[in-house]
């Protein structure tokens, strides 16, 4: 008689291997969810509200700040962004630079947005590095074109702005830290020419890091800035990972920071991105600042 051959018993996976496979599956699902949530958040903006106080204002003044749009759009012709700003009813709208991209002569996103926002409140803008480079190296008419769309562009200059019974001295500083002292530029000369004033002095500049060195003790009450993109990647309990102006673990990436000379510096995380570093845990934001008397 032919002998029956015994069948090989089915191998059973060790318990530790089953646990590893389950954990790997859970991790993969979590990563997919996190990536999906991050993509969703980056396609939508949040609104951040801050309050700063000054004894140099007679009225409560609401400012909406936009920075680092980089031609991003929220809805057709930025309809979602415009609708939100209208609902906020600002007294002033500030552009804190990099609203468009260098070497891109299609300004339609910025111009269309400005045409709509000019009907909401007066717009004042400083130049970011993208606007300045566009003006210097690509299109000498860029600033004039922007002004034709009802944007008041300030570059190393001051202007009196009335809101109710309050007179604001609005100034704009164009160059960043590396170019601030260059003699052919006007930033240092302009700032040093400023006289003490009883009015609330508000500074528009793209670069928050100026307030760690060049703009200390310059009798500036409030500043509106951007540039840091929120540190690009935001780490829990640590904050931004990197900014172009301050390097790794920068100090000034979002919110309101009170400097040693009592200047209150508002830093927008920005509304867009134009960088190889992705925005992670760092939703684009529209900034609203209520300036209150005390």
Image: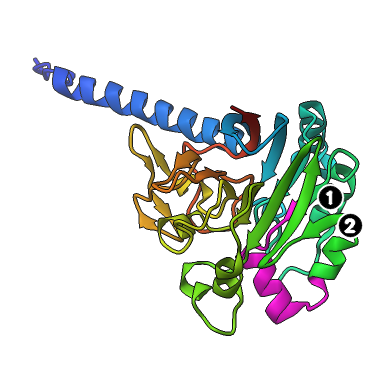
Residue in the picture at 18% in, 24% down? 17
Q: Which residue is mark 2?
A: 149
Number of numbered labels in the structure image: 2
Q: Position of residue 142 (x, y in %)?
A: 80, 70
- Within-10-Å neighbours for mark 1: few <14, some 14–19, many 20+: many
Residue sitting nearer the eye, 292 or 41: 292
Question: Is 240 displayed left or right of 152 in the figure?
Answer: left
Question: Is 288 displayed left or right of 209 in the figure?
Answer: right
Q: Which residue is mark 1?
A: 114
Query: Where the N terminus falls, by quadrant?
Result: top left
Span colored in magenta: 124-142
Q: Position of residue 126 (x, y in %)?
A: 68, 59
- Quarter of the view holding residue 43: top right
Q: Position of residue 46 (x, y in %)?
A: 62, 31
Q: Position of residue 160 (x, y in %)?
A: 76, 53
Q: Is residue 8 visible?
A: no
Residue 141 on the magenta segment: yes
Residue in the picture at 80% in, 44% down? 162
Residue sitting nearer the eye, 139 or 106: 139
In three-dimensional space, the C-alpha distance between marks 2 and 1, rounded to whole angstroms, equals 6 Å
Residue in the picture at 85% in, 69% down? 144
Question: Is 207 displayed left or right of 89 in the figure?
Answer: left
SS of the residue under disc 1:
helix
SS of the residue under disc 2:
loop
Residue 162 on the magenta segment: no
Question: Relative to 236, does residue 208 appear above or below in the rendering?
Answer: below
Question: Relative to 19, does residue 261 appear above or below in the rendering?
Answer: below
Residue sitting nearer the eye, 6 or 239: 239
Q: Which mark is residue 138?
A: none
Looking at the image, is mark 2 or mark 1 earlier in the sequence? 1
Q: Are marks 2 and 1 in contact (CB under 8 Å)?
A: yes
């Amino acid at each position: 008689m032919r002998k029956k051959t015994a069948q090989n018993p089915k191998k059973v996976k060790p318990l530790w291997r089953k646990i590893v496979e389950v954990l790997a599956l859970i991790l993969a699902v979590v990563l997919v969810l996190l990536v999906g949530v991050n993509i969703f958040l980056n396609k939508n903006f949040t609104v951040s509200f801050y309050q700063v106080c000054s004894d140099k204002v007679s009225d409560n003044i609401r400012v909406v700040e936009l920075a680092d749009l980089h031609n991003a759009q929220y809805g057709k012709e930025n309809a979602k962004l415009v609708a939100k700003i209208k609902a906020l009813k600002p007294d002033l709208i500030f552009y804190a630079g990099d609203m468009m991209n260098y070497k891109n002569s299609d300004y339609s996103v910025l111009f269309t947005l400005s045409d709509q926002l000019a009907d909401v409140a007066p717009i004042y803008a400083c130049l970011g590095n993208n606007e300045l480079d566009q003006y210097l190296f690509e299109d000498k008419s860029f600033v004039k074109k922007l002004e034709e769309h009802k944007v008041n562009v300030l570059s190393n200059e001051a202007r009196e702005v009335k809101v109710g019974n309050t007179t604001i001295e609005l100034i704009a500083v164009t160059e960043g830290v590396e170019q601030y002292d260059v003699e052919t530029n006007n930033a240092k000369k302009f700032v040093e020419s400023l006289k003490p004033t009883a009015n609330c002095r508000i500074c528009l500049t793209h670069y928050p890091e100026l307030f760690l060195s060049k703009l200390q003790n310059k009798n500036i009450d409030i500043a509106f800035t951007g540039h840091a993109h929120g540190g690009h990647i935001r780490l829990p309990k640590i904050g931004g990972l990197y900014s172009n102006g301050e390097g790794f673990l920068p100090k000034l990436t979002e919110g309101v920071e009170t400097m040693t000379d009592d200047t209150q510096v508002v830093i927008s995380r920005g509304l867009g991105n134009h960088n190889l570093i992705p925005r992670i845990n760092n939703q684009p934001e529209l900034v609203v600042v209520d300036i209150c008397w005390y």
